[in-house]
Image: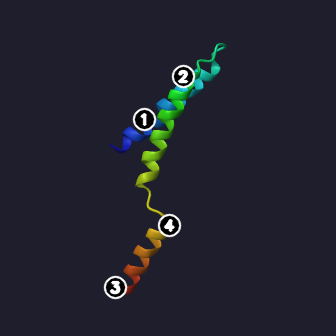
Amino acid sequence: MKYLNYILIVIGAFIAMYAKTNANQNQYILIGGIVVLMIGIYRVAKTVPSKREREDIENNNDDAV
């Protein structure tokens, strides 16, 4: 499942770059590529814990020792 996120990012970036390089830019393809890219980035960012949560976990572990 983790690799799906990275695949979405790569595919979205590729589609966005492809749509940008054509002489006749297709806005819908560009928007679609950006949407796929953002979905991949969002899914990756969702799995990263926030700094505050990480500090709380470290403080709880220090108190237990």
Residue at the image position 50 percent from the left and 39 percent from the top: 38
Q: Answer whether labels 1 and 3 touch (C-beta < 8 Å).
A: no
Q: Answer whether labels 1 and 4 touch (C-beta < 8 Å).
A: no
First in residue order: circle 4 vs circle 2 = 2
Amino acid type, mark 2? Tyr
The Cα–Cα distance between marks 1 and 2, rounded to whole angstroms, is: 20 Å
Name the residue tied to disc 3. Answer: 64
The Cα–Cα distance between marks 4 and 2, rounded to whole angstroms, is: 37 Å
The Cα–Cα distance between marks 3 and 2, rounded to whole angstroms, is: 55 Å
Name the residue tied to disc 4. Answer: 51
Name the quarter where the N terminus is drawn: top left
Q: Which secondary structure lies at badge 3?
A: helix
| Res 7 label | 1
| Res 28 label | 2
Q: Looking at the image, can residue 14 be seen?
A: no
The Cα–Cα distance between marks 1 and 4, rounded to whole angstroms, is: 26 Å
Query: Which dot, 3 or 2, sits closer to the camera?
Result: 2
Residue at the image position 38 percent from the left and 80 percent from the top: 60
Name the quarter where the C terminus is drawn: bottom left
In the image, residue 27 lies at what x, y percent?
59, 22
In the image, residue 11 lies at what x, y percent?
47, 30
First in residue order: circle 3 vs circle 2 = 2
First in residue order: circle 1 vs circle 3 = 1
For label 3, the crowd category at 10 Å Cα-Cα, with few meaning under 14, some 14 to 19 and many 20 or more, is: few
